Amino acid sequence: MDFAISEKMQTILELINEFVDKELVPLEHDFLHGEWADLEPVLEEKRRMVKKMELWAPLHPKEHGGMGLDLVEYGLVCEALARTPTGVYVFGCQAPDAGNIEILMKYGTPEQKKRFLDPLVRGEIRSCFSMTEPDQPGSNPTMLDTVAVKDGDDYVINGHKWYTSSADGARFAIVMAVTNPEAPPHLRASMIIVPTDTPGFNLVRNIQVMGHAGSGWHSHAEILYQSCRVPQANLLGPEGHGFVIAQERLGPGRIHHCMRWIGICNRTMELMCERALTRAANPKQRLAEQQIVQAWIAESAAEVRAARLLVLNCAWRIETQGAKEARQDISLIKYYTAGVMQRVVDRALQIHGGLGMTDDTLIAFFYRAERAARIYDGVDEVHKVSVAKRILKEYAAEHGLR
């Protein structure tokens, strides 16, 4: 892997970091203490500024109005944007829209692209991805209770979903539902586009996550699909290929998540160091002079740098060899980076003491919002088992063992 950053990419990163510091960090208090609806007009103005700077949608191809960066370059951008909670949103590369855009570009029909993809890339609408169910393990997307039954030219969808992130205010959902119940497990489900104003699409609530329900883009919804009827023309990709499409969505998506987590680690490290250097431990010493605090900072720095290199190397492998060849790396970075982030945030909270428990800093927000990193997109334990099986299989084959 070539670790050199082009002069153009260096300039892009400098512009983004400057924008984040000057335009977005000052909005953090309103983000933490206000309502999304009140902040959204301000963020829309920031989005217009980003578009004028030609920094909009860094992940997406130029022909669709984006910057056309490759996965490694986007990883670096995502790291910079994630230092503040609204960064990815303001630059038009937020989840779940980013993943939905990718699969719409690959599998969408011309009509689907015109109606759903184009305005989504432009940032005129938002979307959500509706897969996880309360009564089935989210780590196994072949196990779904939601069904879509053909009736004439339509699908009629019935099911119960939750953790449908950003459904509040979204214009459409991409729903995973069983369409071929008699097929093999990995060919039973399909992805179907469901406009959120369709009768039978019922947003029950924004789920409280550690006491915070959130609103707008920053929320996770519980949804009931009750005889929700949409045209079969809303099928995304081939029928029965929902699992395959989901796996394609998750590979690059884990790079996005992991580099975002590195950005959170970087910001948390800044807060940690500032607190250690300015807070008195006793009348004669600051926290920074306590050896345990020094150890926490050193351990955090090493872990963050190691995780960052793992993620960038994985992004490079996906770009050069494909997601299939990089699948072991994808599992490794997912659980390792999530664990690093959790440890770094926890150390920062400990250094901040009582202040770290409040929303007077970003630390408590990171703590509650990102604990789920070890759960979504496959729980840590599933990824560890998967990696171990591959390692053992390769070793056995190499050494003639069973």
Image (spheres, rainbow, N blue to C red):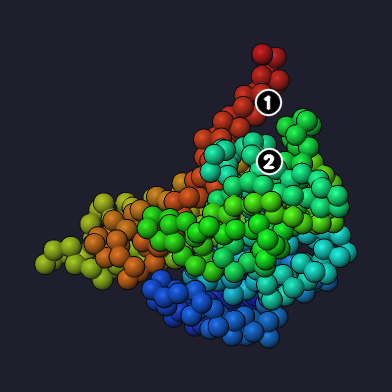
Residue 381 seen in the figure? yes
Using the image, determine if residue 294 lies above or below residue 42.
above
Kind of residue at badge 2: Arg
Kind of residue at badge 1: Glu
Using the image, determine if residue 116 lies above or below residue 29.
above
| Residue 58 position within the rendered picture, expressed as x and y whole percent measured from the top left | 69, 70
**What is the quadrant of the C terminus in the image?**
top right
Q: Secondary structure at mark 1?
A: helix
The residue carrying mark 2 is 327
Going 67% across and 36% down the picture, which residue do you hit?
142
Circles 2 and 1 in contact, beta carbons < 8 Å: no
Question: Residue 337 vs residue 360: left or right?
Answer: right
| Camera-nearest residue between 343 and 312 | 343
Using the image, determine if residue 348 lies above or below residue 215.
above
Going 58% across and 54% down the picture, which residue do you hit?
223
Going 86% across and 60% down the picture, which residue do you hit?
109
Question: Residue 10 vs residue 360: left or right?
Answer: right
Of mark 2 and mark 1, the one earlier in the sequence is 2
The residue carrying mark 1 is 394
Q: Secondary structure at mark 2?
A: helix
| Residue 393 position within the rendered picture, expressed as x and y whole percent measured from the top left | 66, 23
